[in-house]
Image (cartoon, rainbow, N blue to C red):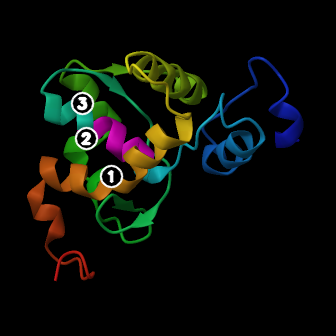
Amino acid sequence: RYVKMAEHEFPGTPIKGVASYSKLLSVAHPEKYAIYDARVAVALNAVQLLMGFNGIVFPYVTGRNNVTGNKQKKQGFSEMEEFAPNALESQGWSVIDPSCAYQTYIELLKDVNARFAERLPLYNLEMTLFSQAEDLALAVKPSLVCGVKSSKTL
């Protein structure tokens, strides 16, 4: 179903299952799609917080990373009340409909990419967000490192 979805100009993109179907879409058409997962969502919101302006709340998806967000342990950036969508909205952020989140993300990546002299594959931009998610979350909230035991923080 997701592979067939990749063939459409504007596929339906609900937030439920986005981490799975975005992987398939990005493999099928890497020039057109990128992965949206728990770390990417945190990175998008953290970058905006670091820039100090009221932005667009990108919906969090379930993750297992103790820094960016672990739903089971109720730990990490995306699990903190101060970074919850309703808390950011009360500070003046715009909340997008979750069914529009993936398309908004893709449009944002394409807009950022258009600003580079040499165009990059969208997966390069996505991988930058993914790989920097922990550092971005920690830059916003350094105390997230407390209680997390990993080779990065020891």
Q: Which residue is mark 2?
A: 46
Q: Which residue is mark 3?
A: 48
Query: Gap between marks 2 and 1, in whole Å?
Result: 8 Å
The residues colored magenta run 40-46
In the rendered structure, does residue 124 fall within the stretch colored magenta? no
Vertical comparison of 17 with 11: above or below = below
Q: Which residue is mark 1?
A: 133
53 vs 16, nearest the viewer: 53
Label 2 crowd (10 A; few <14 / some 14-19 / many >=20): many
Residue 139: image x %, image y %?
14, 50
Where is residue 36, by image quadrant? top right
Mark 1 and mark 2 in contact (Cβ < 8 Å)?
Answer: yes
Say whether disc 2 or disc 1 marks the residue closer to the N-terminus: 2
115 vs 101, nearest the viewer: 115
Where is residue 154, by image quadrant? bottom left
Mark 2 and mark 3 in contact (Cβ < 8 Å)?
Answer: yes
The amino acid at mark 3 is Gln
User: What secondary structure is found at the residue carrying circle 1?
Assistant: helix
Instruction: Specify whether 108 is left or right of 121.
Output: left
What's the residue at 12%, 27% (across, down)? 52
The amino acid at mark 1 is Ala
Residue 22: image x %, image y %?
66, 42
Q: Main secondary structure of the magenta part?
A: helix
Instruction: Specify whether 4 is left or right of 94.
Output: right
Instruction: Specify whether 22 is left or right of 54.
Output: right
The amino acid at mark 2 is Ala
Label 1 crowd (10 A; few <14 / some 14-19 / many >=20): many
Vertical comparison of 20 with 84: above or below = below
